[in-house]
Image: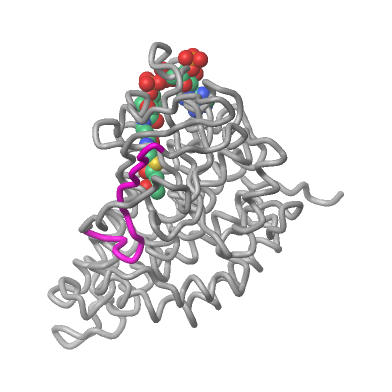
């Protein structure tokens, strides 16, 4: 009997391993060489985008019926992991394209999907996700961006903050209050275009890491959009935002795994070469113990991430728990592993001449965005106590 294919199986299906090999090849040749420069200059790595686009890895999750590569959740996670291994900033290209379009895929009308997904699939446009605001971060439901109905249109006003790829993306999923009395049930989701009159962007944030991925405020000043740009029914926006994050926290877990793998790979090479006290540093047991812990944590994070990806693909009821657990565990592991990688390189690890300090700075954001790890623990605890 043929073995049943499962995303939880220890060995991945062959096609997923083939995708990993293909992405790694592109990333080693065409993404990694720009990673340090993107970090130094804070410029969007256009050359990396072009390389990912040419190989169809820029938005792999878009279904084939909308012109996409039709990658499942595990394949998408592997793409993001492999890009992050080379350049965390670039990994936000496939990750945020998934985040921005997930509300459409989950709740959008067929017409909206046909209009907005093909340009993302072809790489002509990117899609960002606008949930957070200056005063509404962890408490997303306290947002104040307002959408008011005016005939066949909605008029949006407000400020969205921490928007990844803002200004570069052509399209934005914007969550706004349509009924202030109803709190989370009075929030609706809309597609807003960069070219809509009244849309503008703040100055790029000066960040610790992921510097090649622009993060800016999005200003909505009397942005008048046709009513058919609403995603799903009025009042369902918050639930769509949360369902989206259930799926995409898996992608942040994958990003964390990739960053950690990049740091471990570099540190392994370094300790094998570096000699002190007349022998390779890798020959010291203390160093070996550190490497072993790094490898062990990384593999545990990867397995939990892939288990969550399986749940994302199947839409299992326990995805909320697994998405939060994978994101939280993998990002904490990535922070530890990258910090240890810096330690293994000693003084060299602390300089920008070596990539591990960049990886350590990049890892930090994975503990913060798409919900802080404190929020992930709230989400997990609520799910545990519900049962
Ligand atoms: N799926 C479907 N519905 C959900 C849901 C889920 N996973 N989670 C909550 N809901 C629904 C609830 O059922 C509830 O609906 P009803 O009122 O109909 O019962 C409603 O949403 C409100 O739920 P809660 O009472 O649980 O909401 P809350 O106000 O207590 O907030 C929270 C819960 C988990 C803390 C949530 O606010 C949260 O996740 N905060 C973190 C926000 C976040 O992750 N922001 C990330 C921004 S994006 C980003 O970072 C992108 C980037 O840069 C790359």
Magenta stretch: includes residue 54: no
**Quarter assignment of residue 22:** bottom right
- Which image quadrant is residue 160 in? top left
Q: Tell which quarter ligand 1 is in.
A: top left
The colour mode here is one colour
Q: Name the one closer to the observer, 340 or 143.
A: 143
- In the visual, does 346 lie left or right of 107? left
Q: Is residue 370 visible?
A: no
Position of 123 relative to 110 (above/below): below
- Determine the residue located farthest toward the front in the rendered image: 151
Residue range (magenta): 208-222
Instruction: Tell whether position 211 is magenta.
Output: yes
- Write the residue at 36% across / 74% down: 35
Horizontal side of residue 286 vs 319, given as left or right: left
Return the x and y of residue 137 as percentages of the image width and height: 29, 34
| Residue sitting at the far bottom | 278
- The residue furthest right is 1
Can residue 80 be seen here? The reply is yes
Q: Quadrant of residue 371?
A: top left
- Foreground residue among 3 and 323: 323
Position in image of residue 65 (x %, y %): 76, 52
Q: Residue at x 26, y 58 (%)?
A: 204
| Residue toward you, 94 or 1 | 94
Q: Position of residue 210 (x, y in %)?
A: 31, 61
Q: Is residue 98 above or below residue 268?
A: above
Instruction: Please give left or right for residue 224 compared with residue 22 in the image.
Output: left
Residue at x 34% of width, y 59% of height: 214
């Amino acid at each position: 009997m043929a073995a049943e294919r499962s995303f939880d199986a220890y060995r991945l299906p062959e096609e997923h391993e083939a995708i990993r090999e293909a992405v790694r090849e592109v990333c080693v040749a065409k993404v990694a060489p720009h990673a340090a420069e993107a970090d130094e200059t804070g410029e969007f790595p256009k050359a990396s985008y072009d390389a990912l686009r040419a190989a169809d890895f820029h938005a792999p999750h878009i279904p084939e019926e909308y012109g996409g590569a039709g990658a499942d959740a595990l394949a998408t996670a592997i793409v993001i992991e492999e890009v992050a291994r080379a350049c965390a900033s670039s990994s936000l290209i496939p990750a945020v394209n998934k985040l921005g379009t997930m509300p459409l895929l989950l709740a959008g009308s067929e017409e909206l999907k046909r209009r907005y997904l093909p340009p993302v699939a072809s790489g002509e446009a990117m899609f960002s996700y606008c949930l957070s605001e200056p005063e509404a971060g962890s408490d997303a439901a306290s947002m104040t961006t307002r959408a008011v109905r005016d005939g066949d249109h909605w008029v949006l006003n407000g400020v969205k903050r921490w928007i990844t790829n803002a200004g570069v993306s052509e399209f934005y999923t914007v969550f706004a209050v349509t009924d202030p009395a109803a709190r989370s049930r009075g929030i609706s989701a809309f597609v807003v275009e960069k070219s809509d009159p009244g849309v503008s962007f703040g100055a790029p944030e000066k960040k610790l890491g992921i510097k090649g991925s622009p993060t800016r405020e999005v200003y909505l000043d009397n942005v008048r959009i046709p009513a058919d740009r609403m995603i799903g029914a009025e009042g369902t926006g918050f639930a769509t935002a949360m369902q989206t994050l259930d799926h995409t926290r898996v992608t942040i877990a994958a990003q964390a795994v990739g960053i950690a793998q990049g740091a471990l790979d570099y540190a392994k090479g370094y300790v094998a070469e570096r000699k002190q006290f007349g022998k390779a540093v890798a020959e010291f047991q203390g160093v070996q113990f550190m490497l072993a812990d790094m490898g062990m944590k990384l593999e545990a994070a990867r397995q939990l991430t892939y288990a969550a990806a399986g749940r994302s693909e199947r839409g299992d009821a326990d995805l909320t728990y697994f998405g939060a657990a994978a994101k939280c565990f993998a990002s904490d592991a990535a922070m530890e592993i990258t910090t240890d990688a810096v330690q293994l390189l000693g003084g060299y690890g602390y300089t920008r001449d070596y990539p591990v300090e960049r990886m350590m700075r990049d890892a930090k954001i994975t503990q913060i965005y798409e919900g802080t790890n404190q929020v992930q623990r709230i989400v997990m605890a609520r799910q545990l106590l519900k049962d």
